[in-house]
Amino acid sequence: MNDMLWDWAWFGGKALVAVGILMTIAPLLTLAERRIAGFIQGRYGPNRVGPFGALQPVADLIKGVMKEQIIPENAERLLFVLAPVIVFVPGAFGFAVIPWGNAIGEHDLQVIDLDVGVLFVMAVLSVGVYGITLGGWSSSNKYSLLGALRASAQLISYELSLGLTMLLVIMMSGSVDLKDIVWHQVQHGWNVFGGSTWWGLPSGIVGCTLLYICALAENNRLPFDLAECEAELVGGYHTEYSGMSFLWWLFAEYVAMIFSASLITTLFLGGWDIPFVHLEEAPTVFGAVLSVASFLTKIITILMTYIWIRWTLPRFKYNQLMDLGWKGFLPTALVNIAVMAVIGVFLEG
Amino acid sequence: MTQVATTTEIRELPYKDPEQGTGLMGWFKKVLYRLYIPNVLKGMMKTAEYAVIRPKATLLYPEVKRVTRKGYRGEHRLKQDEQGRMKCVACLMCQTACPAECIEISAGPSPWSDRDKVPVEFRIDLLKCIYCGMCEEACPCDAIELTETYTQVALTRDEKIYDLKRLLSN
């Protein structure tokens, strides 16, 4: 009985930490986005609220709560209110199966240890587009609807390549359990560098690049943000949103970004592994803290490059986007897997 | 002898088609160009340069104030001579010259012997004023002037109508 309570306490603690990671990084990310945008454009960005503008997210939150939330007359009220919450699902659910640290004693630092982690992630990723589509459709605005349509078309075409790159990881690690994938990388080397084999290096690099770009497209980030395209579609699927609902959209978007960054880290960049430091041999509290710090460092680096790319590149045209997705990424991902499989069969037999 | 570049000289940059090229190297270049990634990285280096190296264009306003250029036309002011008397003789030249019709003067008898009239009231509606400086040009006594003050704060419209006292104290 006591043991079970203890287990539940561990579970609750880990869940709290995971939610804490999301809830701390997401607001800071909105700040980082605006400040980096400012720097790149020769400005300072928000720097008035608190030291270096650090309290800006709090000010934004207060503003969002105080503002009136307008629901259009012809909108589907329930779906309109629900849509931003549905978008929040993939990020939050997906993060639950990501191993974000080495074990402390017997307890792995992962909220839910699913045997089919990769499949679960694939399933949950597709839910995100429901939110966008519902939000765009329910606001009964033609521009919102167009944005939502674009988002769904884009997500379908990029999810294929995303799935195929995940297949590559499964082939390299021989498991669909995210914890096993990380352990394999800890023991045999990161998947970007080909995992346990030298001939996997090109496949690993191509796969990681593909996953990174597909993650950008999945998150509707520039250069793939056709769904919100403020020049043609006013604001895309969140045109009609205001006040707290709009903040929810933003927040969900950033949580999804954090999730995709942690997915890239887990699948290709070794998860919580620190190269040349053998954390796996010492499942102590100190080792766990180090591993979590390593994981967070990797995530934040990826997120910074997301922001950097957003303020560098212009948006693709719709036909270019589809070209790139269907004629560029899909064949590349297929060839990548084929090469990996064929060489694997020949060399490893 | 030093060579002096004239303004009429046209610098012609040779146009380079990024997809042009022959043989294997040309094909390779073409593929690299179509991959976008090298050019994307180039662009990212550029934005990084802007973010890190280049100075910011923003002035941090309340702490740092812009220094106006000479001859900047801001808030009005009525000048006084060495004896502390206002220079204005209420000739209404500025009122006539004003294209926005924002100046309103009513004259009264002068307490001094060297002039006939002085303004009893002198009102400038700064909300109407277009800061063209015509009043300054029209004044025969060099009595009105546009200062370099560009910050004007008021809570009501009435505060923006400057009277004689306010203009003299400017």
Image (cartoon, helix red, strand yellow):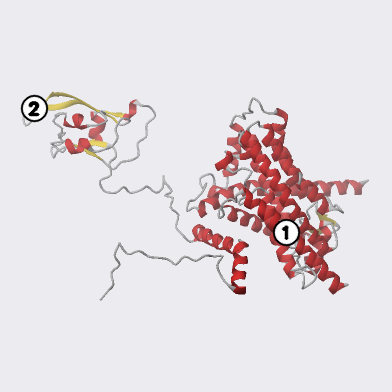
Q: Position of residue B115 (x, y in %)?
A: 8, 30
Q: x, y percentage for residue A166? A: 78, 57
Q: Which residue is mark 1?
A: A265
| Residue A66 sits in quarter | top right
Give the CA separation, mark 2 to mark 1.
88 Å
Q: Chain of mark 1?
A: A
Which amino acid, mark 1?
Answer: Thr
Q: Is residue A19 above or below residue B122?
A: below
Q: Which mark is residue B116?
A: 2
Percent across and percent down for residue B128 are 31, 30
SS at badge 1: helix
Which residue occupies the foreground of this view, A26 or A332? Answer: A332
Split into 4 quadrants, where in the image is the N terminus of chain A?
A: top right
Is residue B46 in view from this perspective?
yes
**Front-lying residue, A275 or A17:** A275
Q: Name the residue located 33 percent from the left edge and 25 percent from the top edge.
A: B158
Image height of B57 relative to B13, above or below = above
Single out the mark in the foreground, 2 or 1.
Answer: 1
**Nearer-the-camera pick, B103 or B4:** B4
User: Dot 2: what SS?
Assistant: loop
